Image: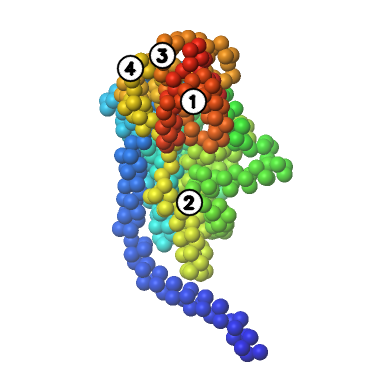
């Protein structure tokens, strides 16, 4: 009986000893762990990872290239008109990018400079925000999640606005924290209002961050019956609305692509069922919550991350942490916009929420660690391990067209022709001149009549050799690639093939009178 009892208690005893040792070790390490040097070191590593991705100079993928060609080929006034290829971006971002190309040229480095700067600034802002809303021991955990986030690193070197969304969201939150903790004068309220009014020109989701911040600040003032402060918050909100209205009015002529954009995301179930009072809506919310923890937040174990986030959320409610609640406040506004089919709630369009997510998760881990240092440390390691590995060893990448074009150029013979799959046309257009391709045509959209294909074939009927360039990044399009190759095999003889990093090129000697294959648009 005693042996049995001893056997049952032994694991508990071991756990207690390990937990006690872990707690003692963490207490000895605490001066370093909470030091500003460690935090700035993490910021430096995060910055280095972003610069490394930028210097890697990967090819512009199709969406980047489509937006880049709009920026390069249009004037400032032209950017106010509907963008080609169903592209959508804030006017302020477009104007910044246009200015950079006029000053520094249209290289990938120039086009990605603004997103890189936004990514580095975000690291500094995040450190400041984390220090204000977390316990000192939780700040390095949150900073590590943010610094090693593979999605944040990737979008810091993509010609898109998502990195700026994060920087502006953090700037607005940091400013709201200062407003929250300081005496509010007319001048400060006006400055807050003007800053928010400018922010909505550079970031679409900035309006959600401002709405959440304004709501929390107003409620806090109303609860304290500080009506002067509440009135000043309303004044700042009025400036935000004026800025948003101005941005909307200027963007309206260019908004023809918005309908396509919203229909595209609707196919991915990016809009909350509205009103959200049904089983279907509850399932959607649970599914979206889980997906967001994976992408864009980047956690490999969404259930564990979700548990830590839930604990952090509960801690914020129980402690009435005004700063943590301010981080949560934009989410209902984004969900309402999603339910009204005005803003998709999915993937990269939620990158601006990553700071709030990792701060709440860090708060949850900190709460667990206060009960059990061993479990808290294990939770942090489990959640951080995969993002660290991915950010260093396996950076995210789309199709890389440059090696394929280099291969074609090195094997090009006089009289050759090149046909570019429709989905790859923007990337080809951007790189054509630097690889010596002056003229090209597209493989026909599969939804169009075959006579269109025959027209292209007639144009190049005097060419014996034809290169076909296909985008093969998306595994869902394997059948489409096979269909194209089967048609090419029927009308000609395959002489060469090269496949690398999501792009494939095939060299064919066409038969007399052959017609070119058709492909379907992505």
Q: CA distance from mark 2 to mark 3?
A: 57 Å
Q: Earlier in the sequence, mark 4 or mark 1?
A: 4
Mark 3, Cα crowd under 10 Å, few <14 / some 14-19 / many 20+, is: some
Q: Which residue is mark 4?
A: 414
Displayed quadrant of residue 265: top right
Please provide percent x and percent y for residue 261: 55, 27
Mark 1 or mark 3: whose residue is earlier in sequence: 1
**Looking at the picture, does residue 192 appear above or below residue 223?**
above
Q: Quadrant of the C terminus?
A: top right
Residue for badge 2: 358
The crowd level at tag 2 (other Cα within 10 Å; few <14, some 14-19, many 20+) is many
Residues packed near mark 1 inside 10 Å, few (<14), some (14 to 19) or many (20 plus): some
- Classify the position of the N terminus by image quarter: bottom right
Residue linked to disc 3: 463
Q: Residue 199 — which label?
A: none
Marks 2,4: beta carbons within 8 A: no
| Residue at the disc numbered 1 | 423
Relative height, residue 487 to residue 209 (above, below)? above
Q: Which residue of the protein is positioned furthest toward the left in this rendering?
A: 103
91 versus 361 height, above or below: above
Q: In the structure shown, which secondary structural element does the residue marked by tag 1 occupy? A: helix
Mark 3 secondary-structure assignment: loop
């Amino acid at each position: 009986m005693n042996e049995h009892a001893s056997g049952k208690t032994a694991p508990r005893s071991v756990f207690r000893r390990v937990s006690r040792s872990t707690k003692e070790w963490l207490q000895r390490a605490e001066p370093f762990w909470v030091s500003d040097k460690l935090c700035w070191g993490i910021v430096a590593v995060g910055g280095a990872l972003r610069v490394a991705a930028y210097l890697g100079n990967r090819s512009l993928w199709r969406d980047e290239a489509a937006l880049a060609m709009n920026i390069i080929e249009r004037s400032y006034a032209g950017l106010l008109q509907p963008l080609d290829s169903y592209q959508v971006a804030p006017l302020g971002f477009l104007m910044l990018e246009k200015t950079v190309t006029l000053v520094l040229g249209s290289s990938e480095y120039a086009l990605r400079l603004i997103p890189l700067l936004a990514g580095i600034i975000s690291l500094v802002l995040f450190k400041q925000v984390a220090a204000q809303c977390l316990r000192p021991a939780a700040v390095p955990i949150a900073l590590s999640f943010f610094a090693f986030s593979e999605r944040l690193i990737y979008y810091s070197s993509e010609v898109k606005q998502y990195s700026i969304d994060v920087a502006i969201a953090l700037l607005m939150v940091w400013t709201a924290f200062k407003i929250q903790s300081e005496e509010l004068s007319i001048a400060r309220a006006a400055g807050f209002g003007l800053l928010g009014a400018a922010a909505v020109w550079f970031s679409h989701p900035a309006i959600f961050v401002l709405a959440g911040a304004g709501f929390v600040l107003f409620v806090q003032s109303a609860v304290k019956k500080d009506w002067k402060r509440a009135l000043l918050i309303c004044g700042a909100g009025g400036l935000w609305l004026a800025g948003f209205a101005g941005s909307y009015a200027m963007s309206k002529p260019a908004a023809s692509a918005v309908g396509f954009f919203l229909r595209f995301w609707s196919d991915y179930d990016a809009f909350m069922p509205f009103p959200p009072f049904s089983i279907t809506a509850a399932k959607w919310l649970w599914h979206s919550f889980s997906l967001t923890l994976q992408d864009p937040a980047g956690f490999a174990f969404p259930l564990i991350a979700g548990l830590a986030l839930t604990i952090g959320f509960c801690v914020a409610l129980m402690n009435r942490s005004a700063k943590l609640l301010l981080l949560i406040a934009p989410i209902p506004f984004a969900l309402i916009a999603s339910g009204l089919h005005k803003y998709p709630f999915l993937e990269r369009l939620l990158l601006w929420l990553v700071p709030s997510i990792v701060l709440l998760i860090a708060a949850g881990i900190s709460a667990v660690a206060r009960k059990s240092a061993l479990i808290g440390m294990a939770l942090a390691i489990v959640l951080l391990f995969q993002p660290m590995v991915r950010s260093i060893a396996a950076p995210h990448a789309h199709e890389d067209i440059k090696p394929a074009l280099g291969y074609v150029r090195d094997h090009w013979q006089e009289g050759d022709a090149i046909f570019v799959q429709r989905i790859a046309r923007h990337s080809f257009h951007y790189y054509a001149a630097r690889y010596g391709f002056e003229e090209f045509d597209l493989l026909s959209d599969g939804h169009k009549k075959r006579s269109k294909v025959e027209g292209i074939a007639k144009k190049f009927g005097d060419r014996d050799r034809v290169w076909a360039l296909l985008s093969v990044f998306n595994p869902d399009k394997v059948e489409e690639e096979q269909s194209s190759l089967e048609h090419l095999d029927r009308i000609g003889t395959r002489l060469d093939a090269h496949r690398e990093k999501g792009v494939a090129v095939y060299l064919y000697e066409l038969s007399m009178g052959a017609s070119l294959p058709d492909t379907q648009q992505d």
